[in-house]
Image: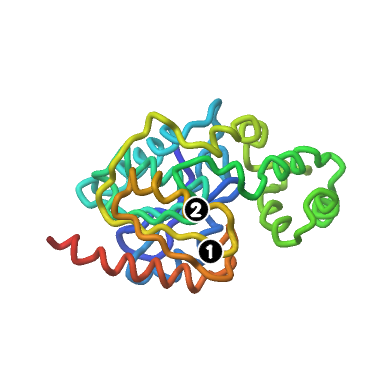
């Protein structure tokens, strides 16, 4: 599977960025650019999102393997890379570290845990709202925003979702994500696959938004069973999209974590 990847910075990539549900790699560009001087990055569009291919089924193991295959083709597999994953991308990043530990020098998991996350923001509502828009009646993005406003009242969330609306050459619109597959796969997306085991023994930075309900203290045992050296950091005044709410704080924590890993590369 040929995933769509965008480079940030110059030189050999040292960080791979994996976005959340209904996102794209470019959603993490601000964070990636903040550290790209020392740590060039790769922004991935995960399967069924952005400009990456659609698939017939969802599975964290398969998605992790697809990223691993791309990394092996793109980079020297003897030099591991750090991985930053948010939400669904965080679960994909965890699966990548557990299934392909030789590829991963460091792991940053943003506002998700290896546990059930169906208590979170409520993506079924968002997916249904997108699928209910009659694209053949849409002339402009403003039309799409107005149609979406009845179901999604938050302007910032609508703006995030409408990044997925793509104008078709010759006229009309289409959604970049595979909305039907993602909606039917929500139980798997919200869950954690039983067949992926640990531990991953390298240091892990685990972030949560201070105003988000996705990561609670009750998730710590499940996380540390797989990642015994995970360190939890709370980003104040941030919700689930903590990298958008507090980009400087997230980038700062990431930069400190990556700097601590550099001496290990020379050992």
Q: Residue at x 66, y 44 (%)?
A: 123
Query: Is label 2 in a helix, a strand or a loop?
Result: strand
* Image position of 251 (left or right of 182): left
Residue at the top extreme, as displayed? 56
Q: Quadrant of residue 200?
A: top left
Q: In which quarter of the image is residue 65?
A: top left
* Image position of 258 (left or right of 153): left
Q: Residue at x 43, y 62 (%)?
A: 8
Where's residue 128, x and y in %? 74, 39
**Could you tell me how far apart the alpha carbons at marks 2 and 1 are, in whole angstroms?**
9 Å
Which quadrant is the N terminus positioned in? Answer: top left
Seen from the viewer's position, the closer of residues 165 and 122 is: 122
Q: How many marks on residues?
A: 2
Give the number of the disc on residue 86. 2
Question: Marks 2 and 1: CB-CB under 8 Å?
Answer: yes
Vertical side of 138 occupied by 153: above or below = below
* Image position of 169 (left or right of 186): right
Give the number of the disc on residue 57. none
List the residue tagged with mark 1.
Answer: 243
Seen from the viewer's position, the closer of residues 24 and 73 is: 24
Mark 1 crowdedness (10 Å alpha carbons): few <14, some 14-19, many ≥20: many
Q: Which residue is drawn at 19% across and 66% down?
A: 263
Where's residue 7, x and y in %? 43, 57
Where's residue 46, x and y in %? 50, 43
Query: Is label 1 in a helix, a strand or a loop?
Result: helix
Where's residue 36, x and y in %? 39, 67
Which quadrant is the C terminus positioned in? Answer: bottom left
Disc 2 or 1, which lies upstream in sequence? 2
């Amino acid at each position: 599977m040929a995933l769509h990847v965008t480079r940030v910075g110059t030189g050999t990539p040292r960080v791979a960025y994996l976005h959340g549900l209904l996102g794209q790699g470019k959603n993490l560009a601000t964070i990636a650019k903040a550290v790209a001087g020392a740590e060039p990055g790769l922004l991935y569009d995960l399967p069924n999102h952005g400009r990456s291919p659609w698939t017939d089924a969802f599975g964290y193991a398969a998605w992790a393997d697809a990223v691993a295959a791309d990394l092996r083709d793109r980079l020297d597999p003897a030099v591991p890379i750090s991985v930053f994953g948010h939400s669904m991308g965080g679960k994909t990043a965890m699966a990548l570290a557990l299934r392909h530990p030789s590829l991963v020098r460091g792991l940053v998991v943003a506002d998700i845990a290896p546990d059930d996350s169906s208590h979170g923001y409520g993506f079924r509502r968002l997916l249904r709202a997108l699928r209910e828009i009659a694209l053949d009646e849409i002339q402009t993005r403003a039309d799409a925003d107005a149609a979406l406003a009845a179901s999604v009242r938050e302007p910032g969330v609508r703006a995030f979702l409408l990044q997925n609306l793509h104008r078709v050459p010759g006229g009309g619109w289409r959604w970049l994500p595979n909305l039907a597959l993602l909606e039917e796969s929500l139980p798997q997306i919200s869950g954690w696959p039983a067949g992926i085991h640990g531990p991953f023994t390298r240091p892990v930075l685990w972030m949560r938004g201070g105003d988000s309900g996705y990561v609670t203290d009750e998730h710590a045992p499940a996380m540390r069973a797989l990642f015994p050296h995970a360190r939890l950091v709370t980003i104040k005044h941030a919700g689930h999209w903590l990298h958008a709410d507090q980009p400087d704080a997230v980038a700062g924590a990431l930069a400190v974590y990556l700097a601590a890993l550099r001496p290990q590369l020379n050992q």
